Amino acid sequence: MNNLKTLIKDKKAKVAIVGLGYVGLPLAIALTEKGFHVSGLDIQKNKVDSINSGKSYIEDVPSSTLKKALDNKKLTASTDKKIFRNVDIIIICVPSPLDKYKQPDISYIRQTAKDIGRFIKKGQLVILESTTYPGTTREVILPQLEKSGLKVGKDFYLAFSPERIDPGNKKYTVENIPKAVGGITDHCSELTALFYQSFINKVITLSSPEAAEMTKLLENIFRVVNISMINELALLCGKMGIDIWEVIEAAKTKPFGFMPFYPSPKIGGHCIAQDPFYLSWKAKEHNFYARFIELAAQINEQMPHYVVTKVIWALNQDKKSVKGAKILIWGVSYKKNVGDTRESAAHDIIWDLERKGARVNYFDPYVKEFIPFEKTAFDKKFSPPKHKSIRYRPDVLKEYDCVLILTDHSNANYDTIAQNAKVVVDTRNAIKNRKYKNVVWL
Ligand SMILES: NC(=O)c1ccc[n+]([C@@H]2O[C@H](COP(=O)([O-])OP(=O)(O)OC[C@H]3O[C@@H](n4cnc5c(N)ncnc54)[C@H](O)[C@@H]3O)[C@@H](O)[C@H]2O)c1
């Protein structure tokens, strides 16, 4: 343990990061910038090749920054698990999705634990960062590592530390987002905290991995419940003829006891809408039904349908049917200024509009190609074609019967859209001015 402490303090500890995606790659870069040597591991060879040739595929990591880490010989990427033999610390950042029944799919975590278990050696620290249900570190990872015959807290160390990164957020990055840690033993917590303190401003040590796992879920459930609540109010305001966006702006002026959340065409992304199901699944083991989570999901799931209804209504005002209408989707990523389309509303909405006979194009500066994917569509025979982002010029807007804003990427002039499009459905309040008669807001 003392040896690893010294290596961490001297920034000489060698770190392996498993999973070089939205979480793993920025983390790898943050570590190299503090002087650590990082070996990245991914099962996708194209990602590994891209990193080794200095081409970043994550918006928050400029290729120039990646090249610097390579030039300084601080970063290497590989698909070879043998790298575990040559490192002191292993951080797991693999996906934790849901299966089609919305149950946790921990196969990536389990496989990684098995891989590490084959190579683990005395003195290593293993940290799980993937979001998951309370108990995963102890119940899934630990047994795989102890199969080696080594003992946790004595021969090797194991902890959970949730990743809280917010892709696209320039203000809060790896370095200044406080890090919560919870180790299996006190020594595990101590080493993990020491490690993160060496490159992150603030570290909070919890009593167990379970408390740390639950902390991440609390954060995401807090968001999903509040966003769904505001989405429900948006539906009601729609019926009552009240502008929900105006109401939120006013409520926001209360200096205490209120935090603004905004309506959206769906809560997309890999985390907020997915992770809470990890808890509702685990809760059932305790004969407990997590009702807020299920209710929030129900409201969230109906939002794309509501948006399509708004489009139909807007076209109707213009005496047009959705069948045959030309519709431009503005933004297909799940949130602004990123290219991540996982679980984005565009999947459900494009699928639905095309099934109804609309001719759909999209524009997204962050997403060159997009294949709408609707898991539960009853019409399995219908498969939407692969779409490519159009080249945007304001005059192309006139070619469409409706422009549907699903993602409010920055650096766009939304007044220009309102001025040039025949009809706009704005699900993000991107168009602030209410003077436009051709705009319908969510
Ligand atoms: N994206 C976010 O904003 C965010 C924020 C906080 C937490 N998280 C959590 O972090 C975890 C990772 O998310 P992400 O967005 O980085 O996912 P990602 O899909 O962008 O990256 C995960 C990477 O892991 C690789 N991988 C899968 N199995 C592997 C294996 N056995 N060995 C090596 N590599 C493997 C994949 O090829 C992929 O490149 C998830 O649990 C997620 O919930 C994500």
Image (spheres, grey):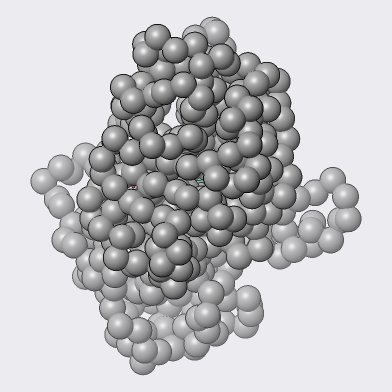
Q: Quadrant of the C terminus?
A: bottom right
389 left or right of 424 in image: left
Rendered location of residue 301, percent (x, y): 44, 42
Q: x and y percent of residue 111 in the render?
A: 31, 26
Quadrant of the rendering where the N terminus is positioned = top right
Q: Nearer the viewer, residue 319 or 63?
A: 63
Q: Residue at x 48, y 34 (%)?
A: 88
Ligand 1 visible in quadrant: top left
Q: How many marks?
A: 0
Residue 106 quadrant: top left
Q: Tell me, yes or no, if residue 258 can be seen here.
A: yes
Vertical position of residue 346 compared to residue 397: above or below: above
The image position of residue 383, as x and y in percent, is 15, 52
Considering every residue shown, the one lying at the far bottom of the view is 395
Q: Is residue 83 above or below residue 22?
A: above
Q: Farthest residue to the left: give it.
A: 381
Choose top left, top right, bottom left or bottom right for residue 41.
top left
Q: Residue at x 29, y 65 (%)?
A: 53
Viewer-proximal residue among 118 and 328:
118
375 lies above or below 132: below
Q: Residue sitting at 49 percent across and 35 percent down?
A: 89
User: Which x, y percent locates residue 96?
Assistant: 41, 34
From this viewpoint, is residue 266 visible? Answer: no
Q: What residue appears at the point 29 percent right and 70 percent down from the top-left corner?
A: 368
359 relative position to 15: left or right = left
